[in-house]
Image (cartoon, rainbow, N blue to C red):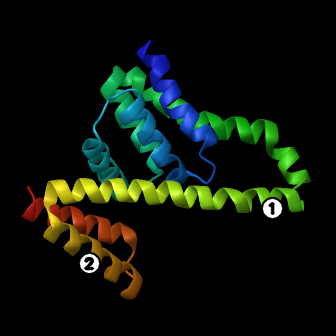
Amino acid sequence: MIYLHIFLAFFIPNIVGYGGGPASVPLIQEEVVNRYGWMTVEEFAELLAIGNALPGPINTKLAGYIGYEMGGAFGSFVGLFATIAPSLLAMVFLLALLYKFRNSPRVKRMTGLIRPTITVLLGVLTWQFFGSSLQGAGLGHTMVLALGSWVLMEKVKIHPAYVIAGSLCYGALFLA
């Protein structure tokens, strides 16, 4: 039964998470934290931070790790397959249809309406992580990391991967 739960925990968010990894992360969190109770919000936030520091798509890293923790090597395989299955199905069955209607005003309007939803989901996830950070690290460290990250990415134009790596180093030095 655990393998079915692993499959559903990653298949459903990835099939409805239009917009790629960032759009699916809050949906995966809902499944993993709230529905199945496999992790706490804090554990998920830490896993997400570590996963973002590594190269590659975030959803496959989450699925591989969580699947392995819950069901061993086969659980990792199930989680990874469930993550890529929606894209695989869409490519196989819908590519010709999407190509045919790619310039349709209805399709463009639909995608325009989905973007605000993704923005709200990411905002909720950010708010939850901000609250967890305040509880775990305190206001001072949270503000240093948030403002420092914003300045480095927006003003200095440093790539987010370096900012994430720097934040991990900051956490290892000052929060461990």
Q: Position of residue 173 (x, y in %)?
A: 8, 64
Q: Is residue 97 above or below residue 37?
A: below
Mark 1 vs 2, N-terminal side? 1
Identify which residue, 55 or 6, lies in the foreground.
6
Q: Quadrant where the C terminus lies?
A: bottom left
Secondary structure category for the residue under label 1 = helix
Quadrant of the rendered image containing residue 12 = top right
Q: Is residue 102 visible?
A: no
Disc 2: which residue:
148
Residue 53 lies in quadrant: bottom left
> Element at badge 2?
helix
Q: Which mark is residue 108?
A: 1
Residue sitting at x 52%, y 51%: 21
**Rendered location of residue 130, percent (x, y):** 29, 60
* Cα separation between marks 1 and 2: 37 Å
Q: Is residue 48 left or right of residue 124?
A: left
